[in-house]
Amino acid sequence: MDDADRAGNRPPEGQPGGDVDERRYRRHQRQHQHHHQHQRGRRYQHQHHHQHQQRQHRQHHQQQRQHRQYQRQQRCSHCTYPIADEPVQGTDDTAGPFCSEACRDAAAADEIVRDDGYKRFTTGVEPLETLVPRGVPSDAFVLLTGDEGTRRTELTTELVWRALTRGEPAVIVAFNDPPIAVLERFFALDWNPLPYLEMDRLRIVDCFTHRLEDRDAFENTRNDWGRFVGDVAEDAVVAVRDPSDVREVANALDRALDDLEMTETGVVVLDSIDEIDTLVQDRLIHNFVTDVRATVCKARFVPMFASATTSGDRAYPIDDEYVFDGIVDFRLADDVIPETRLTQLGVRKLVGAQFVPQWETYAVSPGRGLFTFDPETESTDVFTRID
């Protein structure tokens, strides 16, 4: 700064050069003040950024510590769940640690729970495996709901087929079709259920045949193939004489489960709740769902899947969706690919399990069942090679 610009050396106003020097001095002061404010702002931003990085760093290390603690957390040798407090040590006959004395005593009595086997159900159906990669809880009652034409029947058929081929039993509660037609669904998908009928691994709770006005005429009009399949399946059919009596239906289901010794294994499918709606009042449907959910899913740890239609203005018969542990929505999508109607499914709700919150586009192929594909890149190719 020149000596003439310093406060003590400025020419007085009104003297020669005074006005010019005064303006120069004020301009310099404004520039100096602006520069000081700018520097102060940069220091504040730098300090704020540094503090933000420190917070993120602390949060990251805290998450890592929690994750390491969770991984190091001991699990009970009996129930396999994490030990929340001090572990209960085992005895000479039972290796610990245990989460509780109850688990220690159960282990000593050889009441060993299978390692996580009963807690998850692997569906084997590709779209569901994609959306629920860790499996469906084995005590879940799942509603399959959506538009007509979305292949829900093929999905329930595949759920049964995958269980049978894993060596597990299965029960089909059939309201829509007679037992022969139920078995034809497997043949249509190029799957043969006859060996599993002979192995006594499959039951069909028949809630259809006794609704016919002339049952004898129906049976007499079957062709040779129908009579052959009917004879093979005869011992696997549990007849319900009055399907409008939901208590009788529930009792027939219990008999089928007892025959197959189904506890912590297998699957039950119900096709469909729409047909129950035509037979009984809404409150009875509600009671039926809550009863079988308790006696089949919660008591036996056997998952159950039921289908229902909600296309157009038609609403699902039970307004209380909370009675279901899971809801899988099905829809026809017209806006993904021009001039193409695609089928999609998505998990809306599944208590006790993580799921991917997105829609999966799928198709059905004989021998393969339901499979997913990318509609943006594979649509034409998929539908030209399906059969």
Image (cartoon, grey):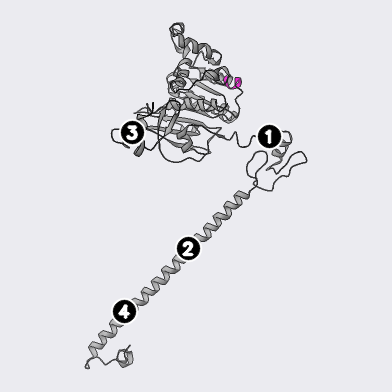
Of the residues tagged 4 and 1, which is closer to the observer?
1
Q: Is residue 55 left or right of residue 376?
A: right
The residue identified by callout 4 is 31
Q: Earlier in the sequence, mark 2 or mark 1?
A: 2
Mark 3 Cα shell of 10 Å, populated few (<14), some (14-19), many (≥20):
few
Residue 226 or 148: which is nearer the viewer? 226
Q: What is the CA distance from the residue labelled 3 to the residue labelled 4? A: 68 Å
- The amino acid type, in three-letter code, at marker 1 is Ile
What stretch of residues is rendered in magenta?
Answer: 256-260
What secondary structure is found at the residue carrying circle 4? helix
The residue identified by callout 3 is 380
- Is 189 a magenta residue? no
Mark 2 Cα shell of 10 Å, populated few (<14), some (14-19), many (≥20):
few
Q: Earlier in the sequence, mark 2 or mark 4?
A: 4
- The amino acid type, in three-letter code, at marker 3 is Thr
Vertical relation: 91 (above or below) 217: below
The residue identified by callout 2 is 53
Of the residues tagged 3 and 2, which is closer to the observer?
3
- The amino acid type, in three-letter code, at marker 2 is Gln
Q: What is the CA distance from the residue labelled 3 to the residue labelled 1? A: 52 Å
Q: Earlier in the sequence, mark 3 or mark 1?
A: 1
